[in-house]
Every structure is written in C-alpha cells, then in structure tokens.
Amino acid sequence: MMRSDMTSTDGTPGGMRDTIDAAPETVVITALDGRIEIANEAAILLFGQTEERLRGMMIADLFAMEYRDQIQQCLERAGRPASGYQLEEFEVRTARPPIRAVKVSLARMKHREGLCVIVQAAPMPQGLSAVTESEPEKPSSVWVYNRDARQNDAVQQVSAKPAPVSDATGINSSIVPDKDSANIAAKSPLPSLDRAVEAPVARAPMPDIGRDDALFAASTSETPASRQAEPPRQPAWSSAALGVSEPVPRKVAQEAAANRAAALKEAWAKAEVAQRTTAPPPQLSRRGPAEQRDLYAEFESVREQKRKVSELPKVKPAKALRSSFEAHRLAAAGECVHLVARIDDGIGDMVVDELALRPLFDLLIERLIAVSPLYCDAEITMDPVGDYGFVARFKDIGRGLSEDELALVGEQPDLSTGFSHTAIARARVAVDLLGGRLAIDTAIEKGTTITVTLDA
C-alpha cells in the first residue's frame, strides 16, 4: 500500500515518522478529539486502508458500532491537561472484515497536542470467529431458521424409521388392507417389503389346539416386559488393554486418595522414628551457658563491623543515580519508554556503601522500564533531605498494585509473581541493608511511585 511521507511537527522530516515505523506494534497518532493524523505500516495493514484514507478519520470509526460511546469516553479522559498520566485501555473489535479482537491503549503525548494509540491483537471472545470478506458478520446469539435444512432433517428422520414387522407370509400388513387380503392371497405372492425377511421361510405346521389351550399358552409365555433384566455385557478386553481410559467413580477416587495420604503419613512417621533412634545422643557440655559463649569472638566481630563502617568512602548519591540513568537510557529507548530525570546535584557526600547503592538504583530503573506503557514517560527525581541525606522517587503510570497484591509483597515476598513484585521485594531488602526507608504509593488506575529515603 502507498502512503505519503510526513514531517514531524517540529519541522524535522521523518522525525516522528521513523520512530513510529520502527515500532512493531500498530501505532496511530491522533488529535485530542480522536481525529487520525499519522498511522504506521502496521496500522495500514490492520485496518486495510491507505494512510490517505485513514488521515482525517475518527479513531472510533475503525471499530465496531457498539464500542463508539466507550471509545469517546476514553478519548475525553485521556485528553485532559495532565499529559502522560492518564492511560486508557479497552478491548474492542474492528469494524471492517476480517473482524479481529484487539486491545487498544491510548495516552496523551507530552511534547505534542495529541494522543498516542497502540493497537495489539487480543483473543477473540468465545462464540465468535474471524469473519472474512465473503462471510458477513453475524452475531452468534441470533438463531436463523433455515426451512430447507429443517425439511432435509425431516426426510432423514422418516427414512431412518424401521419398517413395520411383517407377518409369516412375508407381506407387510401395514401396506395391504385387510379387505383385499383374500384377493392377494389367490394371486402370485408379492415380494417382501421387509428388509429383514427377504423371502418366505418354510415353517412347521402349527398344532391344532383349542381356544382354552391357546389362552393358557399365551398367559404362560414370556413377554419382553416380564423377562428378567440381563446383566450388561462386558467387553472381552479391558479398557486399559485397549488404551482407553475408563471413567473412575468419584467415591472410588476419593477413597484411593485417602488411602494414599494415609500410607504416605505412615511412611513419614516411620522415617521420623527411625531417624530418632539412629541419631547419636547429644553431647552434654559440663560448662555453663556463660562459659559456652565465645566472648572474644563476639567482641572481634563487633569491632570489625565498626571498622568496616568507618572505612567506607564518601560517595555522591546524585552521581550514582545519574550514572545508572545513563546506563539504562538505551535499554529504555529500545522498549519505547521515555526516561525523564530531575536530579539535584547539590546533595552532599554520604558515607554509604556504593556497591549496594548503585545496584538498588539499577533495579528500580529496570522496573520502571518493564512496567511503563509504550511511548509514555517514567520519572526519576532526587532531592536533598537534611544536611547530607536524599529522597529518590521512581514514578510510572503503568498498572499499579492492589491492596492485596501489596500486602502479598510485604508478607510473602518469596511468593510474589512478576518482575514488578519481585523488584519491590528485593528493593526493600537492599534499602534495609543501607539503613534507609522505602515507601510505596500505588493504585491500579494511577500507577506506582517508589520513594527511597536515606539520611546521613
């Protein structure tokens, strides 16, 4: 598809165009009211229109009609003056075939009066499938009556019904009326209409019995209703031999699980008893508790620890944070995240372990890059506190943590899932070793701000 080359808003040709085309995702730049201004190649392929036709259209017109109101509300919220701090995400379907389910993320740009829209593929809702050009879109909840299909089903049902049972002469009694049976018997025999009886079979003559004998025989003969139910036939080969997993009743499965648990508990008890009996008895010391302590070793360890603290060189926290910021700028650009730093160089020197401070800054900046949305800002600030202390803040607008997730990070850091949670747990340990304080201000809709305070 052909498209025209556009220059960026600041006059540099291809400035924003090169950045957007380099992104693998579908990127659309719109005005604050949602009117499309720039679209990359991925957007042209997704929506199936040239950039000339896309330019000037409303972003809501590219998606299904039932999502127009929702998209308009998201555009109004994202276009508020607080640039870059209102991320809107929603899942919709495209308007033109082939119909696709997509996830749309949009936020206001900081250096441009417009919105950045990211479109990513999403799983199709249950009950819907992708619609092609030759197959019009049809809601899955609408049932369409097909008269031809119903007639074909009726014909198949009629043809599948079993034929009526024939009598001993081989002639279907439901086809031939009773009044014409005498005439037909005099003529040549007709072919049997019953598939089960191809020709009349010679039978032995019936004994001549009276009416009473016939009634007695009929009353003593077994009928299908009076027969005893035969046990179900079992296959000659078991289902395990045939490679088929037969269903196990729930009660049997519960009993088997209880038996396995009891056996395992018994084995553990035996192993514990054996370990107690085979372990050597503890050696009792004749010295008292005061004599068992190595006071000299404890004194040397405390003195060595004080010596290590006094021998730590003085470092500049601002310099360490700026060095970590410059080291991760290229990685942030590769993830389409804009790092914004505001560091006060007037912070004095501090006696702190630089080998622990620099990894802490690296960890928090890596978390910013991982959780920040595409083409959004991540802020890093450092301000002085007191005479020689500092407070550093790392702020992102990605999805924040709920109260339960934050409690899980604090109570059970080993069970935290995701790099965002594990980074916070590791940062807490590092800040405690440095003797500082770590505070977290987070919410799902506004993002997360991690504050590190370290006093002299």
Image: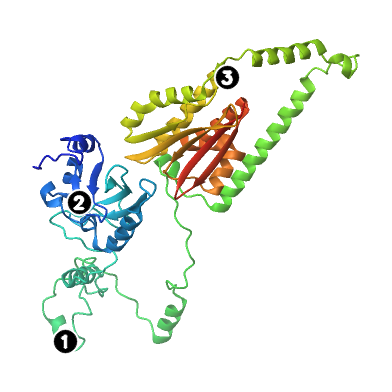
Question: In the image, is residue 296 above or below residue 224?
Answer: above
N-term-proximal mark, 2 vs 1: 2
Residue shown at the point (51%, 24%) measured from the top left: 317
Residue 198 rendering spot, x and y as whole percentages: 19, 65
**Residue topped by disc 2:** 36
Label 3 and label 2: CA atoms lie apart by 52 Å
- Number of the front mark, 1 or 3: 3
Residue shown at the point (43%, 78%) measured from the top left: 217
Foreground residue among 143 and 56: 56
**Residue topped by disc 3:** 353
Residue 122 rendering spot, x and y as whole percentages: 31, 48
Say whether marks 2 and 1 touch (CB < 8 Å). no
Residue 171 rendering spot, x and y as whole percentages: 20, 75
Which element is circle 1 on?
A: loop
Question: In the image, is residue 218 above or below residue 63?
Answer: below
Total of numbered circles in the picture? 3
**Amino acid at dot 1:** Asp
Q: Is residue 183 left or right of residue 245?
A: left
Give the class, few, some or many, for how many residues have Cα within 10 Å of label 2's Cα (few <14, many ≥20). Answer: many
**Amino acid at dot 2:** Ile
Instruction: Using the rendered image of the protein, determine whether residue 392 is visible from the camera's viewpoint.
Output: yes
* Residue most extreme to the bottom: 179
Which element is circle 2 on?
A: strand
**Amino acid at dot 3:** Asp
Instruction: In the rendered structure, find residue 180 and report the number of the disc placed on it.
Output: 1
Which element is circle 3 on?
A: loop
Foreground residue among 419 and 52: 52
